[in-house]
Amino acid sequence: MFFPNDSDGNALKMIYEAGADFSKTYIVDFFIAVVDKNSGEKISKEVQKHGFDCALEQDDESKDWTCYCSKRMMLVYEDIIRIQELLDEISKPYGGYSDGWGVLGG
Amino acid sequence: MGNGYYKIDFQSGNWYIGKGNTTRMNNSANRLAKTYGDKVLNKTHFPASNTAESFKGEAKLMRDNGWYKGHPKSYNKIKSPGYRLLNGKGGLVGGALKFFNMVFPIELFQMRTIYDPCTGKLYLIHYTQSPWSA
């Protein structure tokens, strides 16, 4: 299986090597770094319109606010890139930005 | 954005793999440990995989912030070489940067931290006096 040589591709490669079955769907968490709770709530509303489950949380240690946007999907590089671009576009007017993604497995 | 990728291993045997910087990795570890009551055994972060990606990230930052040569509020004297990579006109070849038919040793490129008062952000800039800086 081919994975592009960038952070997204390398993360996917690591998931593959960890034993994930790429013929199945996984819940992918996309992170949006937000300025504060207020802007995070506005971004969450917009993102939910695109079919994501959203949770707005503040990290206990860093105190950073994050909008966690989750979606069950196939682990396809192009889709992951496209979604990050979409979330970036949605969050930019509110001062937020797409800040990575992650998959739980095991 | 080329900010690396990471893996978090949990006591249960589960793992969490994602793209992001070290702060994001730590936030994810805290969140998952709290949500599932699972102890974090190990966290490993891998920086952005290649220089070309870093250049792309830098170029995207500059583009998104309305940079252009001669911008009155820009501290960047030249356009990022990442612009060429973004446009598909160059690439990384054996530790050197290749643009069209010219190859430049990576040592030619320096990194500097630049504060942009327009956005209030610090940027790590790959900076060079390169042939297209004139």
Image (cartoon, coloured by chain):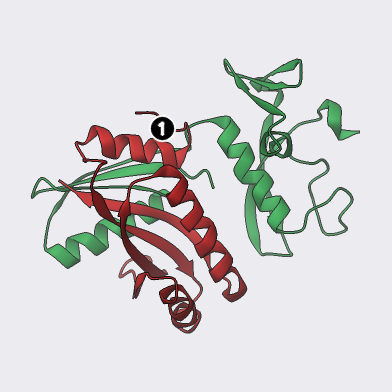
Coordinates of residue B89 in the picture (x, y in percent): 72, 29
Between B128 and A21, the one nearer to me in the picture: A21
Along the horizontal axis of the image, is B49 left or right of B99? left
Q: Is residue B44 visible?
A: yes
Using the rendered view, name the quadrant where residue B74 is placed: bottom right
- Residue shown at 50% from the left, 80% from the top: A39
Using the rendered view, name the quadrant where residue B29 is placed: bottom left
Give the color of chain B as drawn: green
| Number of numbered discs overlaid on the protein picture | 1
Coordinates of residue B72 in the picture (x, y in percent): 88, 58
Q: Is residue B113 visible?
A: no
Q: Is residue A65 above or below residue B127?
A: below
- Residue shown at 34% from the left, 43% from the top: B6
Coordinates of residue A53 in the picture (x, y in percent): 33, 71
Coordinates of residue B84 in the picture (x, y in percent): 73, 34
Between B61 and A71, the one nearer to me in the picture: A71
Q: Is residue A68 above or below residue B127?
A: below
Question: Residue at label 1?
Answer: A3
**Farthest residue, direction front:** A23
**Farthest residue, direction bottom:** A38
Residue at mark 1: chain: A
* Quadrant including the N terminus of chain A: top left
- Residue shown at 76% from the left, 15% from the top: B101
Amino acid type at circle 1 is: Phe
Along the horizontal axis of the image, is B36 left or right of B72? left
- Residue shown at 49% from the left, 60% from the top: A98
| Mark 1 crowdedness (10 Å alpha carbons): few <14, some 14-19, many ≥20 | some
Give the color of chain A as drawn: red
- Label 1: element kind: loop
Q: Is residue B103 above or below residue B52?
A: above
